[in-house]
Amino acid sequence: MTTTPTYRTEPPERGTDLTRATPTGHRPGGGHSVHIHLEHSRARRVTPPSAAVWKSLGLHVLIPLFLAAGMALSYLGAFHAPSPHHLPVAIVGSSAETEVFAQKLHDAAPEKLDVRTVADSAAARAQVADRSIAAAFEASGTSATLYVSSAASDTTASVVEKVFLPIAYQQGLPIRVDDVVPSGSGDPTGQGLFFLLVALSVGGYASAAAISAVAARVRLGWRLLVSVVTAGLVAGIGAIVVGPVYHVIDHSTWNVWLLAWLYVTAIIVIGVGLHPVLRHWTTPALTMLFVMLNFTSSGGVFASALVPPFFSALNSFWNGAAWLHAAQTAVYFPAQSIGRDALTLSMWLAVGLLLAVATHVWSARRTRLADERVAVREDEEGIAA
């Protein structure tokens, strides 16, 4: 009697590509039980992203591309090749030889140096101290002296040293550099206040983005009040770090804080004013205003006379340049006035307030018109029904 083999079908194992028959046991009389495994492979269709996804991605990528291009163009455009442009310097002396030497120096580089003469070393020191000239060179029969101010600009002091040191060597004169107004012991490079400007600027426009995003539907008065309080906190953090923490400055901390408060308030208010119009482009716009154009024209890295004319022109009215000049005055040049700088900062704040009010009115009007259109449409649909 022949026994017919029986088969048992089970679900296929993961990873099996071919049908396999394997004996699982032996029955009396020669019968076998075979276990059959089946595997069905399915090909997956790969579908590319939709046009809407590509469009959204492109719009989002525009912002980092804008920031990358803007930072490269502004920083390299301002700093890649610093050179003097009508840098004011003086030659000490009142003799005919001094006048001839000053004229020759001016004629050798008429676009780079504005050369004048001063009567004596006291006048030279005074003009360097009040920042009306970048440096003064005095030569006698046995030595030479170069008067500079590292507190005004350490990089400018380095530039004028490269101009006058070769002259002294050609004349066989040993030269001494007299730093009339040096930077503080806690700020040997003289750029501590510039780095504080960077911190204040970033804190300001980041606060503007946060306030605009969270409090967009809050009444304008409350948004402005929050802006002023937040600016005071940002300025306070900066003043504490630059003073008690790192001792970049050891006096005039309250003056620096007040100037910083005014500066940061203007940035935040401008950001609050721009947000109803620019929306997600507000942060890139603030980055352009208060990073790309601001730091490059402030005079913190290179003085305005060492950067291209575009950035030098911005230095005359941009808020970062006004703040840095005012802070340097408060810390290193207390005899000078900060009136012009304070006026510039106040005008930026006034522009921000006007912008905030104007965009608030515009946004409220647009919302009201949209609500009226919806109401009219609902009435028309009701009549049609």
Image: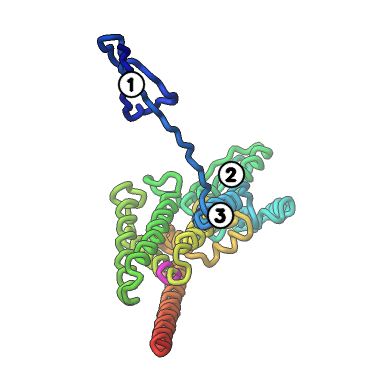
* Mark 2 or 1, closer to the camera: 1
Badge 1, how many Cα within 10 Å: few under 14, some, many 20+?
Answer: some
Colour setting: rainbow
Magenta residue span: 270-274
Q: Nearer the viewer, mark 3 or mark 1?
A: 1
Residue 75: where, in percent of width, then height?
Answer: 56, 51
Eyeballing the image, is 367 above or below 130?
below
Residue corresponding to mark 2: 161
Q: Is residue 99 visible?
A: no
Amino acid type, residue under disc 3 in the picture: Gly
- Marks 2 and 1, how far apart at CA: 93 Å
Q: Residue furthest left?
A: 28
Q: For mark 1, what is the residue? A: 35
Mark 3 surroundings within 10 Å by alpha-carbon count, few (fewer than 14), some (14 through 19), many (20 or more): some
- Closer to the camera in the image, 312 or 164: 312
For this orientation, the residue located farthest to the top is 29
Which residue is under mark 3? 70
Helix, strand or loop under label 3: helix
User: Separation of disc 2 and disc 3 at Cα?
Assistant: 33 Å
Residue 20 occupies which quadrant of the picture? top left
